[in-house]
Image (tube, rainbow, N blue to C red):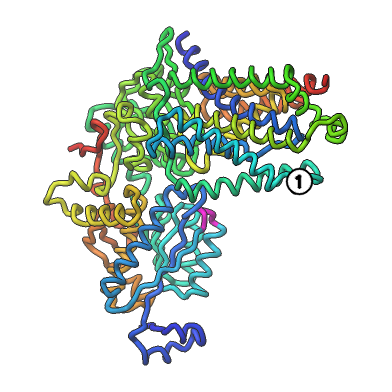
Amino acid sequence: MKTTTAIATLMAPGLTVLALTTPALAEIRIGASLSATGPAAFLGDPQVKTLEMLVEELNAKGGINGEEVTLIHYDDGGDPNKARTFATRLIEDDEVVAIIGGTTTGATMSILSVAEDAEIPFISLAGAIEIIDPVRPFTFKTPHTDRMACQKIFEDIQARGFTKVAMISGTDGFGASMQAQCKEVIGDYGLTLVADESYNPTDADMTAQLTKIRNTEGVEALVNPGFGQGPSIVTRNYAQLGLEIPFYQSHGVASNGFIDLAGADAAEGVRLPGTALLVADILPEGDAQREVAVAYKTAFEEATGTPVSTFGGYAHDAFLILTDAIARAGSSEPQAIRDAIEATTGLVGTTGTYSFTPEDHLGLDLSAFRMLEIRDGAWTTVE
Amino acid sequence: MSELLQFLFSGVTVGAVYALVALGFTIIYNASDVVNFAQGEFVMLGGMITFAAHAAGLPLPLAAILAIALSAALGVAMNKLAVEPARGAPVVSLIIITIGASIFIQGAAQIVFGKQIHSFPAFSGDAPIRVAGATILPQSLWVIGGAVAVFVALWLFFTRTLLGRAVLATSNNRLAAQLVGINTNFVMTLSFALSAGIGALAGVLATPITLTAYNVGIAFALKGFAGAMLGGMGNPKGALVGGFSIGLIEALTAGYLSSTYKDAAAFVVILAVLFLMPQGLFGRKSTDRV
């Protein structure tokens, strides 16, 4: 077990033997590189707050196996170059045992290569499937992939008996990536893409694209991959034009903020694949995720005064997986932590129930997504 | 027919926002030849302060006035603290100072208002107005009306008032302007206050349509700048025509060609116009006459 005192860390980082004489001051150092600022601050901000809150909570309860957890956090602003620098610093200077981070896929890919080289476990909070496909030994991730969101949406469209689908996607990283994934899997569900429009994430009006979709022959359902203000504006324009085809948003806007921004009237009937966290209050008593989702939601909203978001939930789950693994490993050696993470089974998080295998470093299946529908300005689950 | 009309409505809605932002560039540019890249931040502040004040319980009109007044005050502060101390510096340095101010304002807004996306209710409700099968939101009419009103006010200011002419004179030759008794420091302060106020007004009018967040300023500034360049920097008529043109080109391209090319189409037109008429559509003509 690697244990160091503050003095030993300062004076002789290599001489861990010295530290073994004073185990009371032991600590486990966890690193994080997140986008607390920059274009992905919308996602990264709740993640940082979540980690800080959870570390405090955990230490108040006595840490992991009696050892205090220290969080070392850097703000990479979503910039892959900064993320690489910070990952290197976390490993070489701060000597962390594991890294949580990479709010964006770009930052994740940078951290990933550094962490794999140094053989430090790394849990990413970004969406892209490339992070865990192919599987890399030390890299795991908590959010569902874009592809799974597409599959969940198409599954629902198929079940409702529609075949002709239109897409309007943001040109930002999230929207473009999901648009590409959706186009890859759309054929598996016997659906055809009859219109494929896009918009710039800063655009103020999408009625031109939606008019084009409306005038497309036989279109039966509309899917809008994107996050930020774009999907809210698309939803408003959809209502403005009086469109009535079933409308699907992505998990990128799965928050109450979306309903507020789009307006309850415009958002009425919109469906999207979301996590249990979003509907924590209305989950049935027996639901496996109810307890953890409600606990996190309550604690986060009390600590920060801001509404909980799916993205903060990803950080919650990453921290849960990591601390659970360290506790089970009984060790804070990176290799032991990695093995314990891979052996995680049936761990209930806010996003879903995680079961990792050597072939699957995401550990979630489609059942983790719930198809939600907005009714009277609130979320309801679609059975 | 209803299709074309819908594309035009879409273009006019977006174009009016660009035009309002573009109009904000004209005053500071006319007073000092400086393109104020913090202009977009004033638009953001207009929306953000209105949202915050409205959320705190102020009625919407009062919140809007407060936002415009505070932004104007911030414009004055920016002039006094950042631009005036560098008075003798070349125009390029001053432009870089405005970029710095823009980054500073954005950072401060992020701390003060948070990183969430915000909005506030539209002034006249959300029920779309139907015209021959196409629809337009009442708020779009507010933005269009705002753009036209600001244009008329600026045009009158620059051509009919002594103060407006003093601004143009300061731009043409600061020393000569001082010699004929124009208080050029006051002119600069005034132009920053007016520019920031117009920017904030744009934010107040546009936010119910565009939504706002601490980082929307750059996008506003770029599109507004493009509109101002297309029309001819410093000319209110150019800003108005340029802003609307870009909005219409974008909407028509998205509607008839492909939404993938809409930004490209707008910029191709801008490049072509600037290549043939380097001063923009309405050039320097009106300012040179002074």
Answer left or right for A231 relative to A339.
Answer: right
Q: Residue furthest left?
A: A286
Whether residue B125 is in magenta: the answer is no
Question: Residue B78 appears in which quarter of the rendering?
Answer: top right
Q: Main secondary structure of the magenta part?
A: loop
Q: Which residue is mark 1?
A: B93
Q: Which is nearer the eye, B207 or A292?
A: B207
Q: Which is nearer the eye, A112 or A291?
A: A291
Q: Residue shown at 69%/33% (left/top)?
A: B191
Q: Residue shown at 29%/63% (left/top)?
A: A320
Residue A180 appears in the rendering: no
Question: Residue A22 appears in which quarter of the rendering?
Answer: bottom left
B222, above or below A99, in the image:
above
Parent chain of label 1: B
State which region is magenta: A76-80
Q: Which is nearer the eye, B79 or B93?
A: B79
Q: How many marks?
A: 1
The type of residue carrying mark 1 is: Ser
**Which quadrant is home to the C terminus of chain B?**
top right
Residue B160 appears in the rendering: yes
Q: Residue shown at 23%/29% (left/top)?
A: A160
Answer left or right for B141 relative to A333.
Answer: right
A243, above or below A82, in the image:
above
Residue B64, position as x, y percentages in the image:
48, 31
Q: Quick one: label 1, few (<14), some, or many (20+) residues within 10 Å?
A: some
Residue A247, position as x, y percentages in the image:
32, 29
A350, above or below A159, in the image:
below
Residue B244, position as x, y percentages in the image:
60, 20
Q: Residue furthest front?
A: B181
Q: Which is nearer the eye, B54 or B135?
A: B54
Answer left or right for A151 relative to B283.
Answer: left
Dot 1 lies on which element? helix
